[in-house]
Image (cartoon, grey):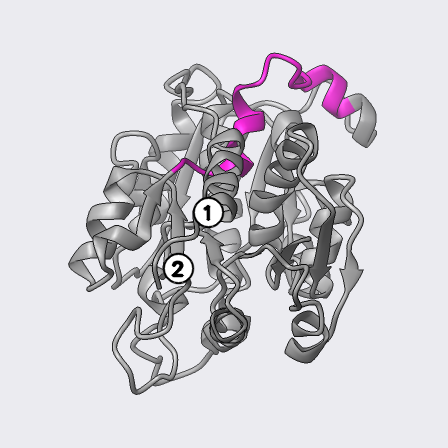
């Protein structure tokens, strides 16, 4: 049995294509144990999962028939670290599939008073060479790292990807509007709010970013513009709604449970901060912008894709970017498929487990 588990939605989106690749390769059975946010993302990808609420519910699947444990990574590394430790004690190889460039050290720091990668699985599948170098600089042993790509991004390069008109039809959105999608990151949820800010806080929050986008749009010349705010899965939609209500002259709505990817396909342009959905939108040939007012920390995701995703920090800078719309066409890139690469790595680890 292959045990696959995820805590955050981003992990589930990265693991879903891997599960399909394993099924196509005839590997199984596969047990998917997902915490609630991850379960929702698995469901969007048409992957059935067992919803769990704690580590014990995941670890009950560790046994003689378990051939490998595959996890995502999260900002609460205690969960994955416990699963990796118990897998190791049971003689079961473990693999973590990294899905994001941001906060890499935090994802592998547990206990908190220990250095990064004190707790880690037998192998970590990472997105690219930039990530491999970054992790090694942080102290991760090079022999633990396998460069596979990010499986969630595979769909962005698939020819069967739906177009803007079809996406709008599915979502019931107007065909003639110029739609700008705003992606929330639930910064307050993860980093807190108020002063003084924690050293981990990026220096801005989602409400400020959305408010500045709307302020810039009030003075833009884009005709028939409409803003759709997509809340983070862990965030209350009312927070974005209150900001939108303060700008009644701009057509807007708060997205519900619609897929962020389909919303990006329906959009003419996408604005966010450091969400992976910005990268997905770029790969789908949508103009994108990372607006980070007052940012005092770098974003590894933006640094790794320098030249792909422009960054603005003030309303005038954001206004200049908006002025280049809708003519802006600098978007799109080709990436190598990753799901099959992770599937092959899993097969290799099952048949020839790494020395631990």
Q: Is residue 308 above or below residue 74?
A: above
Labelled pair 2, 1 in contact (Cβ < 8 Å) = yes
Which residue is found at the position 73% from the left and 54% from the top? 31
Foreground pick, 143 / 101: 143
Judge whether residue 258 can be spotted in this image: no
Q: Position of residue 184 (x, y in %)?
A: 56, 54
Residue occupied by mark 2: 122
Left of 197 or right of it: where is 240? right
Q: Position of residue 309 (x, y in %)?
A: 35, 34
Magenta-drawn stretch contains 70: no
**For the residues marked 2 and 1, what is the alpha-carbon distance in whole angstroms?**
9 Å
Which residue is found at the position 16% from the left and 57% from the top? 137
Residue occupied by mark 1: 349
Q: Position of residue 179 (x, y in %)?
A: 62, 29
Left of 351 or right of it: where is 155? right
Task: Tell me the crowding category of disc 2: few under 14, some 14 to 19, or many 20 or more residues within 10 angstroms, Cα based.
Answer: many
Foreground pick, 188 / 345: 345
Element on which disc 1 rests: helix
Which residue is found at the position 50% from the left and 44% from the top? 351
Left of 266 or right of it: where is 271? left
Left of 221 or right of it: where is 32? right
- Return the mark for residue 53: none
Which-is-in-front pick, marks 2 and 1? Answer: 1
Q: What is the span of residues highlighted in magenta in the rendered image?
A: 148-168
């Amino acid at each position: 049995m292959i045990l696959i588990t995820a805590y955050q939605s981003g992990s589930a989106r990265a693991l879903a294509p891997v599960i399909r690749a394993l099924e196509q390769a005839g590997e199984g059975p596969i047990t998917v144990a997902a915490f609630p946010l991850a379960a929702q993302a698995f469901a969007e990808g048409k992957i059935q999962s067992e919803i769990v609420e704690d580590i014990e519910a995941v670890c009950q699947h560790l046994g003689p028939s378990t051939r490998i444990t595959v996890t995502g990574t999260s900002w609460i590394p205690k969960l994955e670290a416990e699963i990796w430790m118990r897998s190791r004690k049971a003689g079961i190889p473990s693999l973590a599939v990294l899905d994001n460039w941001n906060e890499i050290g935090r994802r592998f720091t547990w206990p908190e008073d220990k250095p990064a990668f004190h707790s880690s699985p037998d192998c970590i599948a990472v997105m690219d060479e930039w990530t491999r170098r970054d992790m090694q600089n942080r102290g991760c042993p090079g022999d633990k790292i396998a460069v596979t790509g990010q499986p969630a991004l595979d769909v962005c390069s698939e020819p069967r990807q739906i177009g803007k008109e079809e996406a709008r039809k599915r979502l019931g959105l107007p065909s003639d509007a110029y739609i700008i999608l705003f992606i929330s990151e639930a910064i307050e949820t993860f980093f807190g709010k108020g002063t003084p800010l924690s050293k981990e806080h990026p220096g801005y929050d989602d409400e400020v970013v959305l408010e500045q986008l709307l302020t810039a749009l009030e003075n833009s010349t884009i005709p028939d513009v409409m803003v759709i705010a997509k809340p983070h899965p862990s965030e209350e939609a009312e927070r974005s709604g209150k900001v939108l209500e303060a700008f009644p002259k701009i057509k807007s709505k708060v997205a519900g449970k619609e897929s962020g990817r389909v919303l990006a396909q329906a959009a003419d342009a996408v604005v966010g901060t450091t969400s992976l959905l910005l990268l997905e939108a770029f790969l789908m040939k949508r103009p994108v912008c990372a607006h980070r007012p007052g940012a005092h920390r770098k974003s590894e995701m933006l640094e790794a894709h320098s030249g792909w995703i422009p960054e603005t920090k003030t309303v005038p800078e954001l206004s200049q970017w908006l002025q280049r719309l809708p003519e802006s066409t600098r978007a799109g890139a080709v990436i190598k498929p990753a799901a099959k690469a992770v599937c092959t790595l899993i097969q290799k680890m099952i048949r020839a487990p790494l020395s631990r």
